[in-house]
Amino acid sequence: MDNRPIGVFDSGLGGLTVVKELKKILPHENIVYFGDTGRVPYGNRSRETIRRYAAQDINFLCSHDVKMIVAACGTVSSVLTDKDVKDVSVPYTGVLLPAAQEAAALSDSGRIGVIGTTATVRSGAYGKAIRGIRPEAKVVGRDCPLFVPLVENGLVAPDNEITRLTAKMYLEPFFEEHIDTLILGCTHYPIIYDIIAQVMDYSVTLVDPGQATARYVKGYLMQHGMGSGEDRQGECHYYVSDRTDEFSNIAGIFLGEKVDQNVEYVSVDTL
């Protein structure tokens, strides 16, 4: 048994969708979350900058004696390589591999779509991971840069016309590719799951990286005897690198509940 917390980080608050799923299936685990809201977004940064920011985020979580680190960010997960994380002192996972494994297993035809930030799609990392599992797979990616600001501004209701039209613009080209599975390759995107499913005429299987990653983390902890030995409800402590006063409202979109405490500010200058 290991009562240390799980460390989770993201460029902003999208990674809270992973925290939500972790809380569901690992209710007795403590979680430390860092959202780098002072430097969001990562998706339009260079690979070198993303690597530097991610290394700082990982070091911050390690300073809180976590037992595992989850990069709950599609951009970071697609950019960091095994070499980048080989010196991390605790087990590490991004959201990319769990989501790729799930998509490869669920797709009947092997025609898989990926949506994400520009950096994620340009990296080709999802295609590489999926073809490592299913060499015959055809992977098609599209970047959807407007989804993140739409989500963070609360335009997430299933009948929101602005977000629906944006999704239609991004997603309709996938019909020509005849995909049967679509990876929501940014942790913001599950918030508009219903809109995406509607635009795709409910004809494709949607892979939520938060759910896939939470299942991966649970399996890893159980396999290695690292689960919490506590019977009580786990606690979450949140850190952000910009204003904390708006955290509760925005976090509520991702977590489905308000966060009124355990939120602290961290200056990026100290990372």
Image (tube, rainbow, N blue to C red):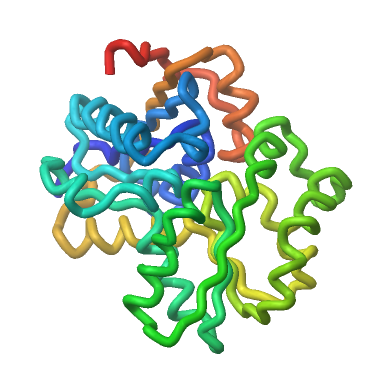
Give the vertical position of 221 relative to 242 (above or below).
below
Q: Quadrant of residue 4?
A: top left
Tell me the residue at 77%/38% (across/down).
155
Picture coordinates of residue 144 (x, y %)?
Answer: 64, 50
Q: Is residue 79 left or right of residue 240?
A: left
Circle count: 0
- Residue 176, given in percent of the width and then of the height, sits at 73, 77
Residue 267 or residue 248, whichever sits in front: 267
For the C terminus, the quadrant is top left
Instruction: Give the residue drawn at x 79%, y 49%.
Output: 166
Query: Whole-percent x and y of residue 105?
Result: 44, 80
Vertical side of 67 occupied by 122: above or below: below
Q: Residue at x 73, y 75 (%)?
A: 175
Horizontal side of 260 relative to 180 (left or right) equals left
Is 79 placed left or right of 165 in the picture? left
At 58% across and 58% down in the image, what residue appears? 115
Residue 128 in the image: above or below residue 57: below
In the drawing, does residue 47 fall left or right of residue 153?
left
